[in-house]
Image (spheres, grey):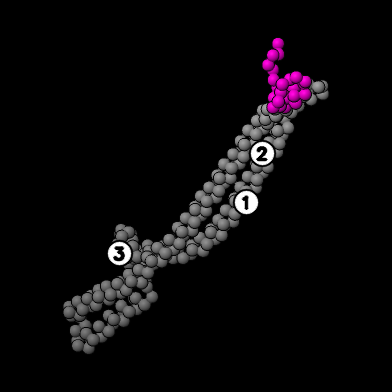
């Protein structure tokens, strides 16, 4: 390296850029580590929330079936739903036995009066069967009503879990966005400092030369320099 190279060495951008590259690599490594930790935490949190969501599964099935049965019983699901409700209602434990017992009692009483084959007995039997069905159907509807609240509660709980997962994902995204912004800001600052380093070195070099020139000028006899500044007056 010659004298000129040594003289211009302070103005080289390479050392500053190498330092900037090292700083940038550190920023990127920190960003990757932070993102990895955040993603891992999000995945772990989601796994627990998914398990909690799954625990509601069996209860949600029961609640859903009960709600459907209630809608069928009200006739909200059309003829097919009404047929399903009728079949479910008449197949309830004790329903047919209770109906048969009531009719047998009614007919025995009619037989005791000698009216078993009369039209009144037939009418009484039909009325009893109708009243029995209506009363028990009302009880059937009441037994299904709690499934509406159960279904609402289970659905709300599951929706809350999914909402929490969504909120967690948004929070993680915000954090990663902030980290990314800070990383890019740091990279920009590092590159800017590297680019300005030769300019600062040149300015320092010039200031040094001026200082040396002032010192040298003040040492010249008769220079008239009293304040440490170069006096060029009268110089041809």
- The residue mark sitting in front, 2 or 1, is 2
Marker disc for residue 37: 1
Task: State the residue at coordinates (59%, 39%).
Answer: 185
Q: To which quarter of the image does residue 90 belong?
A: bottom left
Is disc 3 in contact with disc 2, using a CB cutoff of under 8 Å?
no
Marker disc for residue 74: 3
Position of residue 86 relative to residue 97, above or below, is above
Marker disc for residue 24: 2
Magenta stretch bounds? 211-236
Please say whether residue 159 is one of the residues in the magenta stretch.
no
- The residue mark sitting in front, 3 or 1, is 1
Q: How many marks?
A: 3
Q: Is residue 189 found left or right of 18 in the rendered image?
A: left
Measure the C-alpha gap from mark 3 to mark 2. 69 Å
Is disc 3 in contact with disc 1, using a CB cutoff of under 8 Å?
no
Is disc 2 in contact with disc 1, using a CB cutoff of under 8 Å?
no
Counting residues from the N terminus, which is met first, the one under dot 3 or under dot 1? Answer: 1
């Amino acid at each position: 390296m010659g004298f000129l190279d040594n003289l211009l060495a302070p103005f080289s951008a390479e050392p500053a850029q190498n330092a900037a590259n090292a700083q940038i690599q550190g920023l990127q490594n920190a960003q990757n580590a932070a993102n990895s930790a955040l993603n891992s935490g999000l995945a772990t949190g989601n796994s627990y929330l998914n398990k909690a969501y799954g625990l509601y599964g069996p209860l949600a099935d029961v609640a859903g079936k009960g709600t459907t049965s209630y809608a069928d019983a009200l006739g909200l699901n059309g003829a097919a739903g009404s047929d399903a409700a009728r079949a479910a209602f008449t197949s309830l434990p004790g329903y047919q036995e209770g109906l048969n017992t009531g009719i047998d009692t009614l007919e025995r009483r009619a037989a005791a009066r000698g009216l078993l084959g009369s039209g009144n007995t037939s009418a009484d039997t039909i009325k009893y069967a109708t009243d029995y069905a209506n009363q028990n159907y009302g009880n059937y509807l009441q037994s299904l009503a709690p499934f509406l609240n159960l279904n609402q509660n289970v659905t709300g709980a599951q929706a809350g879990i999914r909402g929490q997962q969504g909120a967690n994902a948004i929070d993680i995204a915000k954090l990663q966005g902030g980290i990314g912004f800070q990383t890019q800001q740091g990279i920009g600052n590092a590159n800017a400092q590297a680019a300005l380093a030769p300019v600062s070195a040149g300015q320092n070099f010039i200031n040094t030369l001026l200082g040396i020139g002032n010192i040298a000028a003040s040492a010249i006899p008769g220079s008239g320099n009293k304040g440490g500044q170069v006096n060029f007056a009268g110089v041809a």
